[in-house]
Image (spheres, coloured by chain):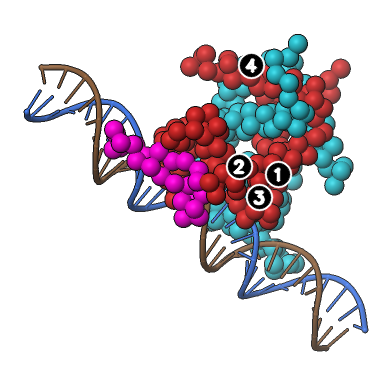
Chain colours: A red, B cyan, C blue, D brown
Amino acid sequence: MSRTELTPSKQRLRLWLKLLRLTRGVEADLRERLRVEYGATLPRFDVMAALFRADEARADHGLTMTELSRALMVSNGNVTGIIERLVEDGFVQRRPDETDRRTTFVQLTEAGKTAFQGMAQAHEGWVNDLLSPLAPAEVDHLIEVLDAHRAARTSSE
Amino acid sequence: MSRTELTPSKQRLRLWLKLLRLTRGVEADLRERLRVEYGATLPRFDVMAALFRADEARADHGLTMTELSRALMVSNGNVTGIIERLVEDGFVQRRPDETDRRTTFVQLTEAGKTAFQGMAQAHEGWVNDLLSPLAPAEVDHLIEVLDAHRAARTSSE
DNA sequence: CGCAAAAATTTTAAGTATGAAATTTTAGGC
DNA sequence: GCCTAAAATTTCATACTTAAAATTTTTGCG
Protein backbone atom coordinates (compact mmCIF):
# COMPACT_ATOMS: atom_id res chain seq x y z
CA MET A 1 0.00 0.00 0.00
CA SER A 2 2.75 2.48 0.91
CA ARG A 3 4.14 4.46 -1.95
CA THR A 4 7.76 4.13 -0.87
CA GLU A 5 9.61 1.14 0.53
CA LEU A 6 12.18 2.47 2.94
CA THR A 7 14.12 0.85 5.75
CA PRO A 8 13.17 1.87 9.29
CA SER A 9 16.49 3.64 9.50
CA LYS A 10 15.80 5.73 6.40
CA GLN A 11 12.31 6.49 7.62
CA ARG A 12 13.62 7.75 10.95
CA LEU A 13 16.07 9.94 9.07
CA ARG A 14 13.21 11.37 7.01
CA LEU A 15 11.25 12.04 10.17
CA TRP A 16 14.22 13.74 11.73
CA LEU A 17 14.65 16.07 8.76
CA LYS A 18 10.97 16.96 8.80
CA LEU A 19 11.07 17.58 12.52
CA LEU A 20 14.05 19.83 12.11
CA ARG A 21 12.29 21.76 9.39
CA LEU A 22 9.23 22.27 11.57
CA THR A 23 11.11 23.44 14.63
CA ARG A 24 13.40 25.72 12.63
CA GLY A 25 10.39 27.26 10.94
CA VAL A 26 8.53 27.84 14.17
CA GLU A 27 11.64 29.17 15.89
CA ALA A 28 12.34 31.57 13.04
CA ASP A 29 8.79 32.86 13.28
CA LEU A 30 8.90 33.28 17.05
CA ARG A 31 12.29 35.01 16.90
CA GLU A 32 11.05 37.44 14.28
CA ARG A 33 7.97 38.35 16.32
CA LEU A 34 9.90 38.74 19.56
CA ARG A 35 12.32 41.02 17.80
CA VAL A 36 9.72 43.18 16.06
CA GLU A 37 7.20 43.45 18.87
CA TYR A 38 9.43 43.38 21.93
CA GLY A 39 12.98 44.02 20.76
CA ALA A 40 13.85 40.71 22.43
CA THR A 41 15.61 37.54 21.32
CA LEU A 42 14.68 33.90 21.76
CA PRO A 43 17.58 33.02 24.08
CA ARG A 44 16.74 35.97 26.31
CA PHE A 45 13.12 34.86 26.38
CA ASP A 46 14.10 31.29 27.23
CA VAL A 47 16.27 32.41 30.12
CA MET A 48 13.57 34.70 31.46
CA ALA A 49 11.02 31.89 31.17
CA ALA A 50 13.20 29.55 33.20
CA LEU A 51 13.72 32.22 35.86
CA PHE A 52 10.02 33.04 35.95
CA ARG A 53 9.08 29.41 36.41
CA ALA A 54 11.64 29.06 39.20
CA ASP A 55 10.25 32.14 40.89
CA GLU A 56 6.74 30.70 40.78
CA ALA A 57 7.88 27.37 42.16
CA ARG A 58 9.80 28.84 45.10
CA ALA A 59 10.03 32.58 45.37
CA ASP A 60 13.29 32.64 47.25
CA HIS A 61 16.57 33.07 45.49
CA GLY A 62 16.22 32.20 41.81
CA LEU A 63 18.47 29.74 40.01
CA THR A 64 22.18 29.15 39.92
CA MET A 65 24.08 29.50 36.68
CA THR A 66 24.49 25.74 36.49
CA GLU A 67 20.80 25.09 37.03
CA LEU A 68 20.00 27.55 34.26
CA SER A 69 22.53 26.00 31.93
CA ARG A 70 21.12 22.53 32.50
CA ALA A 71 17.47 23.60 32.25
CA LEU A 72 18.06 25.23 28.88
CA MET A 73 20.54 22.63 27.63
CA VAL A 74 23.09 25.25 26.68
CA SER A 75 26.72 25.58 27.72
CA ASN A 76 27.63 27.31 30.96
CA GLY A 77 29.71 29.94 29.20
CA ASN A 78 26.73 30.76 27.06
CA VAL A 79 24.52 31.53 30.03
CA THR A 80 27.12 33.95 31.38
CA GLY A 81 26.82 36.16 28.31
CA ILE A 82 23.03 36.16 28.11
CA ILE A 83 22.66 36.94 31.81
CA GLU A 84 25.21 39.74 31.46
CA ARG A 85 23.07 41.47 28.87
CA LEU A 86 19.87 40.88 30.82
CA VAL A 87 21.50 42.43 33.87
CA GLU A 88 22.51 45.46 31.80
CA ASP A 89 18.91 45.82 30.71
CA GLY A 90 17.72 45.68 34.31
CA PHE A 91 15.65 42.52 33.84
CA VAL A 92 17.80 40.24 35.96
CA GLN A 93 19.87 40.55 39.10
CA ARG A 94 22.64 38.39 40.47
CA ARG A 95 22.94 37.51 44.14
CA PRO A 96 25.84 35.69 45.77
CA ASP A 97 25.30 32.58 47.83
CA GLU A 98 26.25 33.42 51.42
CA THR A 99 27.43 29.93 52.28
CA ASP A 100 29.19 28.97 49.03
CA ARG A 101 31.09 31.71 47.30
CA ARG A 102 31.45 29.72 44.11
CA THR A 103 27.79 29.93 43.20
CA THR A 104 25.75 32.90 42.04
CA PHE A 105 21.99 33.04 42.17
CA VAL A 106 20.17 34.78 39.37
CA GLN A 107 16.61 36.02 39.41
CA LEU A 108 14.22 38.30 37.56
CA THR A 109 13.80 41.85 38.80
CA GLU A 110 10.29 43.28 39.05
CA ALA A 111 10.87 44.95 35.68
CA GLY A 112 11.97 41.58 34.36
CA LYS A 113 8.86 39.82 35.60
CA THR A 114 6.58 42.46 34.11
CA ALA A 115 8.39 42.39 30.78
CA PHE A 116 8.31 38.62 30.68
CA GLN A 117 4.61 38.31 31.44
CA GLY A 118 3.74 40.46 28.47
CA MET A 119 5.97 38.50 26.15
CA ALA A 120 4.82 35.14 27.51
CA GLN A 121 1.20 35.82 26.76
CA ALA A 122 1.99 36.86 23.20
CA HIS A 123 4.34 33.89 22.85
CA GLU A 124 1.64 31.41 23.83
CA GLY A 125 -0.67 32.91 21.22
CA TRP A 126 1.97 32.69 18.51
CA VAL A 127 2.75 29.07 19.29
CA ASN A 128 -0.95 28.30 19.28
CA ASP A 129 -1.29 29.89 15.85
CA LEU A 130 1.76 28.17 14.43
CA LEU A 131 0.63 24.77 15.65
CA SER A 132 -3.07 25.39 15.01
CA PRO A 133 -3.19 22.84 12.15
CA LEU A 134 -2.76 20.21 14.86
CA ALA A 135 -6.09 19.28 16.41
CA PRO A 136 -6.23 19.01 20.22
CA ALA A 137 -6.51 15.22 20.08
CA GLU A 138 -3.46 15.09 17.82
CA VAL A 139 -1.60 17.37 20.21
CA ASP A 140 -2.37 15.09 23.15
CA HIS A 141 -1.23 12.09 21.18
CA LEU A 142 2.02 13.75 20.21
CA ILE A 143 2.70 14.74 23.80
CA GLU A 144 2.29 11.11 24.80
CA VAL A 145 4.65 9.97 22.06
CA LEU A 146 7.27 12.50 23.09
CA ASP A 147 6.92 11.60 26.76
CA ALA A 148 7.33 7.92 25.97
CA HIS A 149 10.35 8.66 23.83
CA ARG A 150 11.88 10.71 26.59
CA ALA A 151 11.23 7.99 29.14
CA ALA A 152 12.82 5.38 26.89
CA ARG A 153 15.90 7.50 26.36
CA THR A 154 16.50 8.42 29.98
CA SER A 155 16.07 4.81 31.13
CA SER A 156 18.58 3.48 28.62
CA GLU A 157 21.31 5.77 29.86
CA MET B 1 -10.28 11.00 32.57
CA SER B 2 -7.31 13.24 31.83
CA ARG B 3 -5.18 14.21 34.78
CA THR B 4 -4.90 17.84 33.75
CA GLU B 5 -7.46 20.13 32.20
CA LEU B 6 -5.62 22.49 29.91
CA THR B 7 -6.82 24.74 27.13
CA PRO B 8 -5.84 23.76 23.58
CA SER B 9 -3.54 26.76 23.55
CA LYS B 10 -1.71 25.63 26.69
CA GLN B 11 -1.48 22.09 25.37
CA ARG B 12 0.10 23.29 22.12
CA LEU B 13 2.59 25.29 24.17
CA ARG B 14 3.46 22.17 26.17
CA LEU B 15 3.91 20.23 22.96
CA TRP B 16 6.15 22.93 21.56
CA LEU B 17 8.39 22.87 24.63
CA LYS B 18 8.67 19.08 24.48
CA LEU B 19 9.40 19.21 20.77
CA LEU B 20 12.11 21.77 21.39
CA ARG B 21 13.62 19.63 24.11
CA LEU B 22 13.72 16.59 21.83
CA THR B 23 15.29 18.35 18.88
CA ARG B 24 17.83 20.16 21.04
CA GLY B 25 18.80 16.89 22.66
CA VAL B 26 19.20 15.07 19.38
CA GLU B 27 21.07 17.97 17.84
CA ALA B 28 23.45 18.16 20.79
CA ASP B 29 24.16 14.46 20.44
CA LEU B 30 24.73 14.64 16.69
CA ARG B 31 26.97 17.68 17.04
CA GLU B 32 29.07 15.95 19.66
CA ARG B 33 29.54 12.84 17.54
CA LEU B 34 30.35 14.79 14.38
CA ARG B 35 32.93 16.73 16.32
CA VAL B 36 34.57 13.74 18.01
CA GLU B 37 34.51 11.31 15.09
CA TYR B 38 34.92 13.63 12.13
CA GLY B 39 36.09 16.97 13.46
CA ALA B 40 33.06 18.44 11.74
CA THR B 41 30.20 20.66 12.80
CA LEU B 42 26.48 20.43 12.25
CA PRO B 43 26.17 23.52 10.02
CA ARG B 44 28.99 22.26 7.81
CA PHE B 45 27.28 18.89 7.59
CA ASP B 46 23.96 20.47 6.69
CA VAL B 47 25.51 22.52 3.92
CA MET B 48 27.35 19.54 2.52
CA ALA B 49 24.17 17.47 2.63
CA ALA B 50 22.29 20.08 0.64
CA LEU B 51 25.07 20.24 -1.93
CA PHE B 52 25.28 16.47 -2.13
CA ARG B 53 21.56 16.14 -2.74
CA ALA B 54 21.72 18.82 -5.42
CA ASP B 55 24.58 17.00 -7.10
CA GLU B 56 22.59 13.77 -7.17
CA ALA B 57 19.55 15.49 -8.62
CA ARG B 58 21.41 17.22 -11.45
CA ALA B 59 25.15 16.86 -11.59
CA ASP B 60 25.78 20.12 -13.34
CA HIS B 61 26.70 23.23 -11.45
CA GLY B 62 25.64 22.90 -7.79
CA LEU B 63 23.55 25.48 -5.98
CA THR B 64 23.58 29.23 -5.76
CA MET B 65 24.14 30.94 -2.43
CA THR B 66 20.49 31.97 -2.33
CA GLU B 67 19.26 28.45 -3.02
CA LEU B 68 21.45 27.17 -0.20
CA SER B 69 20.28 29.85 2.18
CA ARG B 70 16.64 29.04 1.46
CA ALA B 71 17.09 25.27 1.61
CA LEU B 72 18.69 25.45 5.04
CA MET B 73 16.52 28.30 6.32
CA VAL B 74 19.48 30.35 7.42
CA SER B 75 20.45 33.91 6.52
CA ASN B 76 22.39 34.64 3.37
CA GLY B 77 25.28 36.21 5.28
CA ASN B 78 25.56 33.06 7.35
CA VAL B 79 26.00 30.85 4.31
CA THR B 80 28.86 33.04 3.08
CA GLY B 81 30.90 32.29 6.19
CA ILE B 82 30.26 28.55 6.28
CA ILE B 83 31.08 28.17 2.58
CA GLU B 84 34.24 30.20 3.08
CA ARG B 85 35.52 27.71 5.65
CA LEU B 86 34.47 24.72 3.56
CA VAL B 87 36.36 26.16 0.60
CA GLU B 88 39.44 26.59 2.78
CA ASP B 89 39.15 22.93 3.75
CA GLY B 90 38.94 21.91 0.11
CA PHE B 91 35.49 20.37 0.41
CA VAL B 92 33.66 22.95 -1.67
CA GLN B 93 34.41 25.04 -4.72
CA ARG B 94 32.79 28.17 -6.06
CA ARG B 95 32.09 28.72 -9.74
CA PRO B 96 30.82 31.93 -11.31
CA ASP B 97 27.74 31.98 -13.50
CA GLU B 98 28.87 32.88 -17.01
CA THR B 99 25.64 34.65 -17.94
CA ASP B 100 24.87 36.42 -14.65
CA ARG B 101 27.82 37.82 -12.81
CA ARG B 102 25.79 38.39 -9.64
CA THR B 103 25.38 34.72 -8.82
CA THR B 104 27.94 32.19 -7.66
CA PHE B 105 27.46 28.45 -7.93
CA VAL B 106 28.78 26.30 -5.14
CA GLN B 107 29.41 22.57 -5.29
CA LEU B 108 31.20 19.78 -3.47
CA THR B 109 34.68 18.82 -4.63
CA GLU B 110 35.51 15.14 -4.98
CA ALA B 111 37.15 15.31 -1.55
CA GLY B 112 33.97 16.92 -0.27
CA LYS B 113 31.77 14.18 -1.68
CA THR B 114 33.94 11.45 -0.21
CA ALA B 115 34.08 13.12 3.19
CA PHE B 116 30.34 13.67 3.19
CA GLN B 117 29.45 10.10 2.27
CA GLY B 118 31.34 8.78 5.26
CA MET B 119 29.69 11.21 7.63
CA ALA B 120 26.24 10.69 6.13
CA GLN B 121 26.29 6.97 6.74
CA ALA B 122 27.33 7.44 10.36
CA HIS B 123 24.78 10.24 10.73
CA GLU B 124 21.93 8.02 9.57
CA GLY B 125 22.95 5.41 12.12
CA TRP B 126 23.06 7.95 14.93
CA VAL B 127 19.65 9.34 14.07
CA ASN B 128 18.28 5.82 13.91
CA ASP B 129 19.67 5.11 17.38
CA LEU B 130 18.43 8.35 18.87
CA LEU B 131 14.92 7.82 17.50
CA SER B 132 14.90 4.06 18.02
CA PRO B 133 12.29 4.26 20.79
CA LEU B 134 9.85 5.19 18.02
CA ALA B 135 8.44 2.11 16.33
CA PRO B 136 8.30 2.14 12.51
CA ALA B 137 4.50 2.49 12.51
CA GLU B 138 4.79 5.44 14.87
CA VAL B 139 7.44 6.98 12.64
CA ASP B 140 5.18 6.69 9.59
CA HIS B 141 2.32 8.24 11.51
CA LEU B 142 4.46 11.16 12.66
CA ILE B 143 5.68 11.76 9.13
CA GLU B 144 2.07 12.00 8.00
CA VAL B 145 1.23 14.43 10.78
CA LEU B 146 4.19 16.63 9.93
CA ASP B 147 3.39 16.54 6.22
CA ALA B 148 -0.22 17.51 6.91
CA HIS B 149 0.92 20.31 9.17
CA ARG B 150 3.30 21.58 6.55
CA ALA B 151 0.60 21.44 3.88
CA ALA B 152 -1.81 23.36 6.11
CA ARG B 153 0.73 26.06 6.82
CA THR B 154 1.88 26.61 3.26
CA SER B 155 -1.69 26.77 1.97
CA SER B 156 -2.71 29.39 4.52
CA GLU B 157 0.02 31.76 3.39
C1' DC C 1 45.81 20.08 59.36
C1' DG C 2 47.29 19.89 54.29
C1' DC C 3 46.39 19.06 49.85
C1' DA C 4 44.44 16.93 45.80
C1' DA C 5 40.12 16.29 43.53
C1' DA C 6 35.78 18.20 42.54
C1' DA C 7 32.51 21.92 41.73
C1' DA C 8 30.79 26.57 39.97
C1' DT C 9 31.74 30.00 37.22
C1' DT C 10 34.20 33.02 33.88
C1' DT C 11 37.25 33.68 30.16
C1' DT C 12 38.89 32.71 25.65
C1' DA C 13 39.01 31.49 20.79
C1' DA C 14 36.58 30.08 17.03
C1' DG C 15 32.44 29.25 14.66
C1' DT C 16 27.49 30.11 13.82
C1' DA C 17 23.61 33.29 13.27
C1' DT C 18 20.93 37.36 12.42
C1' DG C 19 19.34 41.77 10.17
C1' DA C 20 20.70 45.69 7.92
C1' DA C 21 23.63 48.24 4.98
C1' DA C 22 26.61 48.27 1.08
C1' DT C 23 28.09 46.48 -3.49
C1' DT C 24 27.65 44.80 -7.89
C1' DT C 25 25.03 43.45 -11.64
C1' DT C 26 20.82 42.79 -14.27
C1' DA C 27 16.25 43.93 -16.01
C1' DG C 28 12.37 46.94 -17.44
C1' DG C 29 10.00 51.06 -18.51
C1' DC C 30 10.08 55.26 -20.84
C1' DG D 1 19.83 54.04 -24.69
C1' DC D 2 19.30 56.07 -19.51
C1' DC D 3 17.82 55.19 -14.98
C1' DT D 4 15.47 53.30 -11.35
C1' DA D 5 14.01 49.05 -9.22
C1' DA D 6 15.10 44.48 -8.28
C1' DA D 7 18.22 40.64 -7.45
C1' DA D 8 22.48 38.13 -5.58
C1' DT D 9 25.91 38.42 -2.69
C1' DT D 10 29.13 40.25 0.79
C1' DT D 11 30.22 43.09 4.63
C1' DC D 12 29.29 44.75 9.11
C1' DA D 13 27.90 44.98 13.91
C1' DT D 14 26.08 42.39 17.35
C1' DA D 15 24.51 38.39 19.61
C1' DC D 16 24.60 33.51 20.47
C1' DT D 17 27.05 29.09 20.96
C1' DT D 18 30.36 25.77 21.96
C1' DA D 19 34.48 23.41 24.01
C1' DA D 20 38.38 24.01 26.49
C1' DA D 21 41.29 26.39 29.66
C1' DA D 22 41.68 29.15 33.68
C1' DT D 23 40.02 30.80 38.23
C1' DT D 24 38.12 30.51 42.61
C1' DT D 25 36.22 28.04 46.28
C1' DT D 26 34.80 23.89 48.68
C1' DT D 27 35.18 19.13 50.10
C1' DG D 28 37.12 15.01 51.69
C1' DC D 29 40.72 12.04 52.72
C1' DG D 30 45.06 10.62 54.69
The numbered mark 2 sits on a residue in which chain?
B
Q: Secondary structure at mark 4?
A: helix
How far apart are the alpha carbons under marks 2 and 3?
26 Å
Percent of width and height locating residue B141: 77, 21
How far apart are the alpha carbons under marks 4 and 2?
28 Å
Residue contact at pointers 3 and 1, CB within 8 angstroms: no
How far apart are the alpha carbons under marks 1 and 2?
32 Å
Tell me, yes or no, whether the highlighted magenta stretch contains residue A33: no
Q: Is residue B17 left or right of residue A62?
A: right
Q: Does residue B89 show up?
A: no
Closer mark to the observer between disc 3 and disc 1: 1
Task: Write down the region rendered in magenta.
Answer: A86-109
The numbered mark 1 sits on a residue in which chain?
A
How far apart are the alpha carbons under marks 1 and 4?
30 Å
Q: Residue at x 49, y 33 (%)?
A: A59
The residue singled out by tag 3 in the image is A34
Q: Is residue A56 left or right of residue B2?
A: left
> How dense is the environment of label 4, judged by Cα within 10 Å: few (below 14), some, or many (20 and up)?
few
Q: Residue at x 62, y 55 (%)?
A: A39
Of residues C16 and A121, which is closer to you in this image? A121
Q: Residue at x 82, y 33 (%)?
A: A133
Kindly indicate the quadrant of the structure image that contains residue A123.
Answer: top right
Q: Amino acid at mark 2?
A: Asp
- The image shows a total of numbered marks equal to 4
Percent of width and height locating residue C8: 35, 35
* Mark 3 and mark 1 on one chain: yes
The residue singled out by tag 1 in the image is A122
Tell me, yes or no, whether the highlighted magenta stretch contains residue A100: yes
The residue singled out by tag 4 in the image is A148
Q: Secondary structure at mark 1?
A: helix
The numbered mark 3 sits on a residue in which chain?
A
Res. B46 mark: 2
